[in-house]
Image: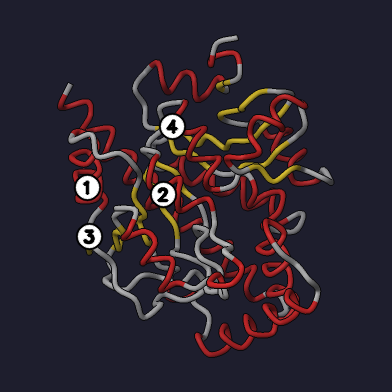
Amino acid sequence: MSLSYYIQLSEEVAEAKRTNKPVVALESTIISHGMPYPQNIETARNVEKIIRDKGAVPATIAIMDGKIKIGLSDSELVQLGKEKDVEKVSRRDLPAVLASKKTGATTVAATMICADLAGIRVFVTGGIGGVHRGAQETMDISADLQELAKTNVAVVCAGAKSILDIGLTLEYLETQGVPVIGYQTSDFPAFYTRQSGYGVDVHAQSAEEIAHMLHVKWELNLEGGAVIGNPVPREHEMDPNEVDNIIHDAVKAANDGGITGKETTPFLLNRLKEISQGATLTTNIALVENNAVTGADIALALNALKTTSN
């Protein structure tokens, strides 16, 4: 079977590809594993609407019925948001989930792979995975970081979740040659807060500036993606000290419960929501929607550059 057998574009995405309209990829683990129902479905719909309103086309990606779906219908969004036992799919899981025809939600790494297969260069998410705290002993490092080093997709995010070791995450990205770009910031954002205390490689003021860097990178055949750190809007930022205390309690609960591997992040996010009485969920929704605005702007600017250079 050819590669095209496994990839199914929605009508909206297929039309965008035919007419050279910019497309923005969206992951699906945020729907199935990252947020509770019904906020997960509401947020997915809002993010898609934001991207359409900016003049681009959203492509939420998931694995369904043995196909990589690039763009989901509303009923498929609802299915992902409600269905139990949806597989969490990273690079290693793609073949098994496709072959078994199970329903799978794509992580950052898997979404990058699928977006690349569909020729989509800009991807919006909440935050990237990274080096987990204590990775010196556990070797718990997200596959997202390796994917960023090899796959030509730019990831717009609110930085890395502060449940991770952000310093080591940035060191890993530097070693892999992945540029970390701060959008209107010189400080790498920490998901719930605007600043992590760690710098970025490049401070960009506009979507056009970022698009130009990406265009040059890929014209030079420099393999791999880029991280665009887009801080959570100031009015939705949480207090850094409060976040540190909540994360400390959540990490302790995970360690005490023997939670490891790909179950760690969903467990911690749910625990954070409980401890903060929903405050982390409110911030999470706000930052994802803000990333959709920035991602759409970058996709539009990148598309304009490609059209001009052809």
Residue shown at 52% from the left, 86% from the top: 239
Do the residues under discs 3 and 4 have CB atoms within 8 angstroms? no
Instruction: Tell me the number on the disc at residue 80.
Output: none
Q: Quadrant of the C terminus?
A: top left
Cα distance, mark 2 to mark 1?
A: 15 Å
Q: Nearer the viewer, mark 3 or mark 1?
A: 3
Q: Quadrant of the N terminus?
A: top right
Residue projecting furthest to the left: 309
Q: Nearer the viewer, mark 4 or mark 1?
A: 4
Mark closest to the chain's N terminus, 2 or 1: 2
Q: Which residue is mark 1?
A: 208
Q: Nearer the viewer, mark 2 or mark 1?
A: 2
Percent from the top left, x then y, of residue 209? 19, 51
Provide the secondary structure element on which disc 3 rests.
strand
Amino acid residing under circle 4: Asp
Amino acid residing under circle 1: Glu
Q: Which residue is mark 4?
A: 116
Residue shown at 72% from the left, 49% from the top: 32
Residue shown at 36% from the left, 70% from the top: 188
